[in-house]
Structures are given as C-alpha cells and as structure tokens.
Amino acid sequence: MSTVVRLAQSFDEWRAAARELIARGVPPADVAWQSQPGDGDLFSSTPEATDNSAPLLRLPRPLVELLEGAACFNVHDRWAFLYQVLWRWQLGQHDVMSPADTDGARLHAMAKAVRREEHDMHAYVRFRERSEAEGAPRFVAWFEPTHDVLPQVAHHFARRMGSTSWMIATPQASMLWDGASLHAGPALLRGAADIDDAGEALWLTYYRSIFNPARVNADLLHSHIPSRFWKNLPEGAIVPAMLSGAANGERRTGQTASVGQRSGATMIPIAAERA
C-alpha cells in the first residue's frame, strides 16, 4: 500500500483522520503525519483531505483522556505514536493502556509531562498590568511552555479572573480573554521585554518586603521553580541579589538590608517595673 499523508494541527483533526484511517484499515507504517503544511522531506506527498463520514470509534474514557493529554506533548512524532496506540487498541491489544507496556509507558509519561506543564504555567504566569488608557487587554503575560498547554491554561485563568480582560502570549500563539470569551491568535510578542508594567516596581517592593533571609533555602527554592522560568519572572531579576545577601549575613537579622533601612514606628523604652 502507498503511504497515506494526513495533516493534523490539533487533537480534533488527528482524531477525525485517525477514525477514517482505522475504518480503511490503514496500518501505522503506511501513514505519514504532518503537523504543519509542508512538513516532511522533498519526497513527501501533499496531505489528503480527511473523510469525516467514517464511523465513530468506541473507546474507554481513560484512553481518550490519555490520548488527548499526550497530544499536547511537543514531539515531532506525537500523531504517529498516538495512531499506533489507537491501532493496537482496535486490534484488541488493550494492554497498550498499561504503564507496563512499552507504548503504554510512553503514553502515560507524555500525559504526565503535559499535566506538569499545565501546573507550572498556572503557577508561574505573571500578568503585567497595562494602563486603562491603552485599552484592552488590561493584563498581559508572557510564557514559554514546553508543551502545547496554552488553551487549557487559558480556560483556567478565564474562570479565575472574571470579566477582567487579559492576554497570554507565547512564542507560538496567544490567547485573549475579552471578559466574556476566549480568542486564539498567532504569536504577537517577541518576549517579556515587549510588555511595559507600571506596577512592576510595586510588586518587586512587596516581594522584597516579604523575603525572609533567615528562612531562605536556595536549593529548595530552585527545586520548586525550575531555572527555565526565572528569566520571565519579574522577581527573577532580584532573587540572586537577595540570596547573596542572605548568605552574607542578613540571615542574622531576618530581614534584607533594604527593609532594615526603612523608617518604622518609634519604640519607646519602658522600665521593667512599669511594664
């Protein structure tokens, strides 16, 4: 059989194409998957249109959830691998869902990595506030995810931020929330430096004020926040200096030097017998 070429730019497109290929009995070895038009080498064929009239496949929900999660794992052969899993399942090889199976182990690992990336993006996205005079969106954030989790994360923040407009930009795409609905778009920013934030100085002042040198654990801090996130965190620019200060004596006072220099309430000494 000649090679069948299919284009899949999303899980829904892959699912429709996979359903058709399963119905036609096309084995994984005879399918070439493209993630973008023009992918492949000089000898690659143009992708054929998917026949959407193929019958539905009955799959257990856990398998669908694993496939959908793993589809966000950013690796060049993800569509081919997912089709291989699906092909084995429809042949009755249901152990393909098991972590003990070679393909099952990879499927679970991919889905787990995507869940981890979603969690990290929830934790380390930093919205910068824009002035009202600039119009919507009111808040803008920049993030560089390893996997394709922007749509899922955008739904998370849409639920959390109510009617406030915002945009999350990544190197590949952007998601805009206008206060009522989400809009997907192409990459609009080149990096965090494209975002002006009048409130960032206030945030850094607050971060310095809550930093406790006496309790800091640099190793634990770096283990909780992977190094690739630091460059896009506003506090990433001041944390090295604060860690250095903690290592050089600020642990004794339990406060950074900048906090210690501020004027505070005047303490009136009271004799012990009057206390």
Image (spheres, rainbow, N blue to C red):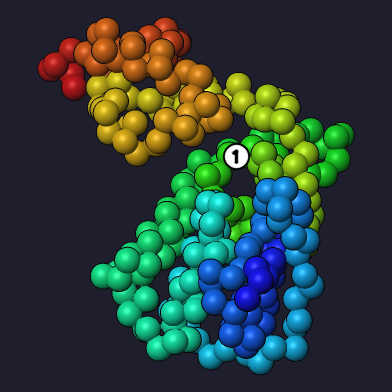
Residue underneath mark 1: 143
> How many residues crowd mark 1 within 10 Å: few (<14), some (14–19), many (20+)?
many
Question: Where does the C terminus fall, quadrant-wise?
Answer: top left
Residue 17 seen in the current view: yes
Left or right? Give the position of 24 relative to 145: right
Give the left or right position of residue 20, taking residue 272 as reference: right
159 or 153: nearer the eye?
153
Q: Is residue 159 visible?
A: no
Q: How many marks?
A: 1
Q: Residue at x 86, y 40 (%)?
A: 135
Q: Quadrant of residue 52?
A: bottom right
Tell me the quadrant of the picture where the N terminus can be found.
bottom right
Seen in the picture, residue 140 relative to 237 is either above or below; the reply is below
- Where is residue 63? Give x, y as percent: 45, 78
Residue 195 locus on image (x, y percent): 71, 29
- Secondary element at image label 1: loop
Q: Residue at x 49, y 79 (%)?
A: 87
**59 vs 244, nearest the viewer:** 59
